[in-house]
Amino acid sequence: MYTNPEREAGGRFGRPRGIGGGAYCCGSERVYNYARLVDSRARGLHIQGGQLRCDHAYPARAFREDSFDATTRIRRGRFYQCAGRPQATRVRFYDTGEATARLHHFFAHTPNPALKLVAIGVEDSLWRILNAERISTGEWLVTLKARGGAGLLPEVDADKVPELGRAGVVKAVDHMVDVAHRETPGSIVDVARNTAALLMGVYAADREPDAEKRRRILGQDLGDVCKHFRDNVVLKKLEVVTSAGHILARLHPRNKPNEQQRHDLRPVTEDDATFAVSAIGLLLNEFQWTRTSP
């Protein structure tokens, strides 16, 4: 694959098509962006925004997007790595005919899954590597998912979450973001209630030395977890956390038609769903489980 660094501003460049005489056509219907692998294992990861380019200070890579689902925030595509400095090559462009251009040469590349993150297009557009599979062309088709809460929730720093609930918290927050993008207000409130119960349960259980009590706390629903916070000498100081959990618990019945009739409750609205998602972000910040937490 070749790219012309003087024509890359539009973000479109592609696999060459031979046209004879050593000339190549660099147009493509696919969208390509420069990419940079990021070591997510590094402590204190901070990314500054900026356009990625084929800078020889690091081995530049390009990402060819094959598909993108805006609802699930999942994109699939292939990676290519820059082979070196651009070389003068006789080419034929779709729009301007033949010309001599300085072209970068790229070859198929498979990112190291251990690094887990890749910046695409701009440095602060980070995507998590989910998996890679070899396809018929011999290239690797890589599946990526947007990192963080897509502007809805703060990004969880897994290292700050207690080990006894780390995997569950990360999964629950990801699920909360997915649901917030595609479900009804009632479903969003339901998921927020369950997520809050898990977050508060993990936080409380981590501070309980008795193994049996930890197990019981982790199995409680949101109302019982809120009561545990109110009754605990240390946890009752977290009034904002307890209040947020209590409101989410009280919103839940509003999603049930029989409860609406019995207690003359209004149905759940979009504003309630927005609050529910924000409440999960508040809990993450209060527990200091985010990347921006001290």
Image: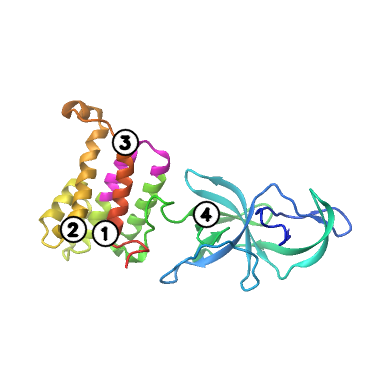
Mark 3, Cα crowd under 10 Å, few <14 / some 14-19 / many 20+, is: many
Range drawn in magenta: 179-196
Measuring from the top left, give residue 257's x and y in whole percent.
25, 28
**Kind of residue indicated by mark 1:** Glu
Instruction: Considering the whole magenta stretch, tell me its main secondary structure.
Output: helix
Q: Which residue is mark 2?
A: 238
Contact flag, marks 3 and 4 (Cβ < 8 Å): no
Q: Secondary structure at mark 2?
A: loop
The numbered dot on residue 286 is: 1
Q: What colour scheme does the image use?
A: rainbow
Of the image marks 1 and 3, the number of the one nearer the N terminus: 3
Mark 4 vs mark 1, foreground winner is 1
Tell me where residue 11 appears, x and y as whole percent. 65, 54
Task: Name the quadrant of the N terminus.
Answer: bottom right
Q: Amino acid at mark 2?
A: Leu
Q: Above or below — where is 212 with respect to 87?
A: above
Q: Earlier in the sequence, mark 1 or mark 2?
A: 2
Pointer 4: what residue? 144
What whole-number distance in Å separates the C-alpha atoms at marks 1 and 2? 8 Å
Location of mark 3 (residue): 186
> Is there any visible trace of residue 220 in the rendered image?
no
**Residue extending furthest top?**
261
What residue do we see at 68% from left, 57% from top?
Answer: 8
Q: Report whether 125 appears left or right of 14.
A: left
Of the residues tagged 3 and 2, which is closer to the observer?
Answer: 2
Q: CA distance from mark 3 to mark 2?
A: 27 Å
Q: Indicate the position of residue 102 as horizontal and vertical percent values.
A: 77, 64
Residue at 27% x, 52% y is 198
Answer whether labels 4 and 2 touch (C-beta < 8 Å).
Answer: no
